[in-house]
Amino acid sequence: MWQEEASMHQMVVGFADVDTARQVVREAAELAAQTGASMHIVTAIDEDATTVVDIGTDHWEIRTLDQAEEAVRNFMVTLSDKVDYTVGVFEGKPADVLIAEAERLDADLIVVGNVRMQGPGRLLGSVGSAVAHHAPCSVLIVKTT
């Protein structure tokens, strides 16, 4: 099905500003480039907070949500595969946010990493495990190093 009507497909991809998540997004971007799928890159944060910075007469308010979105966009420009993507940054648990966005978008695929899916972590739960068990669509779990 991915090859037949690839340009109509939507994938939801989890992102955090860490090496393993960057690896997941790289592989998802490669898949999107090959299939014509669009990517919705999702970041979940615990709580949106605002930091106020005053220097002389200058005043800045920096929100956690804005910083997370900027991290995604800064990473995406480094990729060799240029793909269509949107960014969603939400307060909440990563697995819950990924599943909710996949449902909202009627996504065909969720892409996550396998961090903490080996050994005892598999029993205790992880983002990948929770997504795999509750996703409304197919799930690709990328083996990260």
Image (spheres, grey):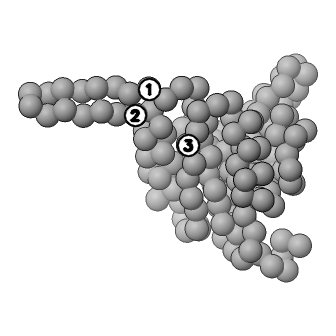
Say which amino acid is labelled 3. Answer: Val
Say which amino acid is labelled 1. Answer: Ala
Give how far apart the Cα atoms at labels 3 and 2 are: 11 Å
- The reply, left or right, for residue 110 in relation to residue 22 is right
- Percent x, y of residue 96: 74, 36
Dot 2: few (<14), some (14–19), or many (≥20) neighbours within 10 Å? few
Where is mark 2, residue-wise?
Answer: 63
N-term-proximal mark, 3 vs 2: 2
Q: In the picture shown, does residue 82 fall above or below 27? A: below
Q: In which quarter of the image is the N terminus?
A: bottom right
N-term-proximal mark, 1 vs 2: 1
- Residue at 65% x, 60% y is 39
Q: For the image shown, how many numbered marks are present on the structure?
A: 3
Give how far apart the Cα atoms at labels 1 and 2 are: 6 Å
Say which amino acid is labelled 2. Answer: Arg
- The reply, left or right, for residue 142 in relation to residue 60 is right
Q: In the picture shown, does residue 119 fall above or below 98? A: above
Q: Are marks 1 and 2 in contact (CB under 8 Å)?
A: yes
Dot 1: few (<14), some (14–19), or many (≥20) neighbours within 10 Å? few
Give how far apart the Cα atoms at labels 3 and 1 are: 13 Å
- Residue at 34% x, 26% y is 51
- Percent x, y of residue 17: 54, 38
Tag shown at residue 118: none
Q: In the picture shown, does residue 4 fall above or below 50? A: below
- The reply, left or right, for residue 107 in relation to residue 137 is left
- Residue at 58% x, 39% y is 90
- Percent x, y of residue 40: 63, 56
Where is mark 1, residue-wise?
Answer: 49
Where is mark 3, residue-wise?
Answer: 89
